[in-house]
Amino acid sequence: MTTRRMTVSQALIEFLAHQWTVDGDHRERTIAGTFGIFGHGNVAGIGQALKQLSAEDPTLMPYHQARNEQAMVHESVAYSRMTRRRSTFACAASVGPGASNMLTGAALATINRLPVLLLPSDTFATRVADPVLQQLELPNDASMSVNDAFKPLSRFFDRVQRPEQLFSAALGAMRVLTDPVETGAVTIALPEDVQAESIDVPAEFLADREWHLRRPRPDRGVIADVVRAIRAAERPLIVAGGGVIYSDAAAALRALVESTGLPVGVSQAGVGSLAWDHPQFLGAVGSTGTTAANRAAARADLIIGIGTRYSDFTTASRTAFQNPAVRFVNINIASFDAFKHGSAIPVVADAREAILELTATLEGYRVDEAFAADYSREKRAWDDVVDAAFEPRGLDLPSQTEIIGAVQRASDPRDVVVCAAGSLPGDLHKLWRVRDDLGYHVEYGYSCMGYEIAGGIGVARADTSRDAIVMVGDGSYLMMHTEIVSAVSEGIKLIIVLVQNHGYASIGHLSEDVGSQRYGTLYRYQDKAGNNFESGEILPIDLATNAESLGIRVIRVEPGANAIADLAAAVATAKASDRATLIHINSDPLLYSPDGEGWWDVPVAAESTLESTQKARADYLEYQKNQRPHLGAGAGERNN
């Protein structure tokens, strides 16, 4: 057997450089590159390996800097979504705080079912120097380190305590990264001494290896059950989720609905499944949904979920589906999701494969004309509402809705809007008029503040033929704006639209809804006597100047009657440039987007001396009456 003498880190990095994902006729690198922030825990291990490989062959394993360990995980996850989970990055961090900084990113990746490889350094396996700098010590468990915190956040975890363990750890990691059911954060903890130890590495470990994505077809006979359910339904509705995007099923879904007349509502992850102006597209469903989709959901007697995990926003906290006779057909590659809501017919299969079989088997079927006329009328009504909401009102401080409309009009069909947290994701979900299946990138599984700019860089890195347009509020910007430096250093073009509203707009609105009167949500000087931040003057924050100091080009949209027109012109200018650009605009956070008749369950205090909370509690109890469990149909009913 031919072997090479290498360090553990050198072997791992070269191994990763030779892994390939195959999806039908498509083949690309599974690990597109490595992010690394170096410290004493990995500078002599992973750092040295990357340096050596870059000297031998700079193209074999691209290396990228980051300014924050959490951010490099976010960038990798965004890249993964844009590649339909076919490719991602490895993220190497030093021991202690460098490693634990990636925990939030790990949770985000696993919750969103997006692959990323984490390589946190660990304390000495030999314990020859114990305790070392940044080591967690627990008197009752000497084997515990901060990296054990990754275990509940990872779909695969291993710790390479001896060099020989590298082979099984690396192969196990690749299996999960390329498994559409199991994928998420994959963590290989690397003790700092083991990283630099030598090992004889078999040549076949370093050879090109292909990992084929599974696209399972539905079990024989189950599609016939689905077809019978659809034909028997009076008001069926498809709820399309992220699985439609990941399985590249948008074209197949379009063919299905055009041949049948089935209407479609979408979750956050499913936006892009159909273009906004498609006759069967009713828009977002659930808490942040449109009136068209939510009214169809409330009346539906059959919900056909395709690639959705049914989060509380999609189900409007189990108030969306009000028909007493409603049944669920859940098509999902993961049985965990296919069986949710006591599904009458769970279909464990790839979204695209299942849709193709449904289309063929439903030949000749059309929904009732009266039903089609009804949902078409609702769609037109909602589109009219959005048209009116997008019209500039000439205010000094425009609404967020007007800002979204201006950015929408100035964007191209293949541009990608990027967002994650605050009030923007809810407004974008119901208002953004997506024209491309990859044109909407809103991280809402974890809704992580600070994701936006790093995510936008990941989107831009994945496809340079598109413009990534990051929409971010001032609160989320302040969480992790330093990745602007990464974009500048690598010449990555993205457009950041920074909406300044001097506080947390989303939670401010929610705080009013639960009777807490926007407490703690405004950016004001502290009133020490009153123990609040409500009554002071607005803080003299200049985020545009802050961004300029990081090296990015900044365009300031000044308050005034022409703010929306100036914003549209700024976006056009940014698109014409080959540089990263940040556009700063002020907004009025008290001007809300159109209501889509959705609800979100956020408990209100059962006891309070505040009149506002007492009223909110009464309203909450009324909404709560609409919640209902969905337990599916029994076997006897299902077979009738």
Image (cartoon, helix red, strand yellow):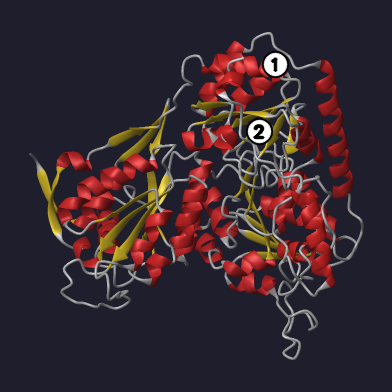
For this view, does 284 lie left or right of residue 446?
Answer: right
Name the residue beneath numbered marker 1. Answer: 232
Q: Quadrant of the C terminus?
A: top right
- Circle 1 sits in a helix, a strand or a loop, which is it? helix
Residue located 39% across and 39% down the image? 178
Seen at 83% across and 53% down, the residue is 402
Secondary structure beneath disc 2?
strand
The percent coordinates of residue 634 (x first, y second) are 58, 25
Q: Residues within 10 Å of mark 1 (few under 14, many from 20)?
A: few
Outermost residue on the bottom side: it is 529
User: Who is closer to the viewer here, 515 or 390?
Assistant: 515
Residue 239 is marked as: 2
Between tags 2 and 1, which lies in front?
Answer: 1
Q: Is 131 displayed left or right of 409 in the figure?
A: left
The circle drawn on residue 619 is none
Q: Position of residue 86 (x, y in %)?
A: 44, 38
Q: Is residue 1 above or below residue 60?
A: above
Question: Foreground residue, 615 or 197?
Answer: 615
- Against 629, residue 373 (above or below) is above
Q: Amino acid at mark 2?
A: Val
Mark 1: which amino acid?
Ala
Q: Could you tell me if residue 28 is visible in this image?
A: yes
Front position in the image: 563 or 630: 630
Q: Residue at x 44, y 27 (%)?
A: 215
Whether residue 35 is visible to the viewer of this picture, yes or no, is no
**Given the current orientation, which residue lies at the most extreme top position?**
364
For the point 31% across and 40% down, which residue is it? Answer: 19
Q: Quadrant of the N terminus?
A: top left
